[in-house]
Amino acid sequence: MRDENLAYIVDNYLEFEEVKRLTRLSDDELNKLIEEKLIPSPSYVIDSEITISSPLNDQHTLTMSRRYFAKNIVDLIKKNSAESYEKLKHEFKQNLLSSLNNHENKAFAYGNVFDEKDQIISEKADKALEEEWDYFCKGVYGICTLNNDENAIIEKEIAIKRILDFIANKSSSQTKEEENYLKELNEELNKSTSLFAPYQRELSSRGKYLDKLLREFSLDDLIKKY
């Protein structure tokens, strides 16, 4: 029987050896890019132990580790391998700011980093952007966003914050207007956010908030399936 978590990861991510084949990089070259944070770390690591036995009453044990990356890792390698860490980090943060500034619901992001004149509050924004860069380098956004890029990060951030705002302000009567708005929020989250591996689903933002809301409003058919 195929484990659903392994199936999800194998189907949606690129394993280290496959990344090497597609990019023609050596182990050392690929590891160096990860160590220097020129590309994100693997989003999933699968460690396994295999025991070989025979009728001769002998036994041999193998331990293996496989690393899985978001599927855009090949494009990131082509784009980033000749750049410096400082330049990549600067571009990443600038792209985040651009995506944020251009979003119609930007005030929801990061607890609102805009002042009364709709200008970015640098100190608040810089802290958020530093955290996002750290998450990106660790491979976190290869897990929770579909495209593992700056725009998807902003889209996910705003979608989740809008859902939390909906939870905080919804009525007990479940109006048609609220139902339609929830459907809109569901569509928005689905545009940017992944399902997570099945074992992670319940504790993800999708599982904790959106899936429960859809059930609460009897919209179970809209819950995104594997």
Image (cartoon, grey):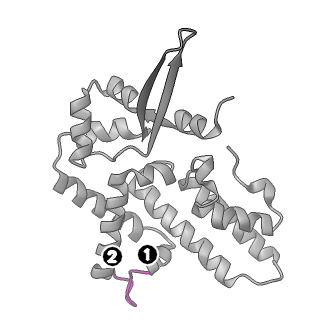
Q: Helix, strand or loop at disc 2?
A: helix
Left/right of residue 152 with respect to residue 89 in the rendered view: right
Label 2 to label 1, Cα distance in Å? 8 Å
- Pinpoint residue 224: horizontal percent, then vertical percent: 69, 51
Q: Can you say which quadrant of the picture contains the N terminus?
A: top right
Left/right of residue 15 with respect to residue 200 in the rendered view: left
Q: Helix, strand or loop at disc 1?
A: helix
Q: Can you say which quadrant of the picture contains the C terminus?
A: top right
Is residue 141 visible in the rendered image? The answer is yes
Q: Foreground: 83 or 142?
A: 142
Marking on residue 125:
2
Q: What stretch is highlighted in magenta?
A: 112-119
Q: Foreground: 92 or 118?
A: 92
Check the image and name the residue furthest to the bottom.
Answer: 116
For label 1, the residue is 110
Check the image and name the residue furthest to the front.
Answer: 57
